[in-house]
Amino acid sequence: METQALYLDDTYVHYARAGDGEQTVIILHGWAASLKQWEWFLPILANAGYTAYAVDLLGHGEAPPLSQNHTIQDYFDYMRRWTEAMEIRQPILIGHSMGGYLSLQYALDNPGAMRGLVLVDPLYSYHQFDKYHQHARRLLGKPEMLKVGEFVFRLAPAWLFAAGQKWGLSDVNGAPVPLRQQVALDHKRADPHIIQIIAIIGDLRPRLAQVSAPALVTWGGKDRLLSPASFEVLVDRLHIPPELKR
């Protein structure tokens, strides 16, 4: 599928599009991923009558790099400028992992601005991290350790990320080979500054009940990064009616 770049003064947004329906769907990928991992899904949405987009987030895929001291707000401002330039109104946001966090934050900051949310193994709080990432969060909160982490991430070869999947260190273990290869490539080409997200991600739990957009939450029971039990907590805090839970 062909991709496009939209230039916005001092930056640009790399994205893919399929379909020409009245309802727009935007897919936001997870940490160290890219729109390439969701290209297969765009034709399905297009055939279902939607206009579907997948976007590379800052520091990921073919998007511009991040500043060294970036914040979560930088991701939002980047997406806001793109949606405004594209004149997208009332989209459905599909967010995976970190993309789920961004989708929830967008819904909280812009009530009534979207048609709905589809959250796939979504991140919404650093409390979801496993013990390894909780420890990494504490370390990366120190500037000197953040530089070390970025240095290691930059030097790590693609085969190491691929091997991590075989060792069961990733939630894509058992996925199709092309997808696992793409995951490894996306890790390698990502801006090393993205590891800062582990240290700066916030906690949306106190605000989740304020989400007014209809939401569908789906997850796998073998997620090795985020606790599967945490997704049940999200469903409860979003006040999804019992008859819709299954």
Image (tube, rainbow, N blue to C red):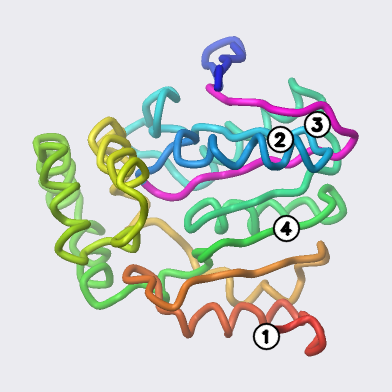
Q: Residue at x 84, y 38 (%)?
A: 49
Q: Residue at x 57, y 25 (%)?
A: 15
Quadrant of the image occupied by residue 209: bottom right
Count of number-bearing discs: 4
Helix, strand or loop under label 1: helix
Residue 80: quadrant of the picture:
top right
Among numbered discs 1 and 4, the one appearing first in the sequence: 4
> In front of the other: label 2 or label 4?
2
Q: What residue do we see at 39% from left, 56% from top?
A: 200
Q: Kindly identify which residue carries mark 2.
A: 52
**Element type where label 2 sits in the image:** strand
Q: CA distance from mark 2 to mark 4?
A: 14 Å
- Residue range (magenta): 14-31
Residue under label 3, please give it: 88
The furthest residue to the right: 22
Kindly report the secondary structure that dominates the magenta region of the rendered protein.
Answer: strand
Question: What is the distance, in whole Å, between disc 2 and disc 1 at their CAs?
Answer: 29 Å
Give the mark nearest the N terminus, 2 or 1: 2
* Nearer to me, 45 or 242: 45
203 versus 9 height, above or below: below
Badge 1 vs badge 4, beta-carbon distance below 8 Å: no
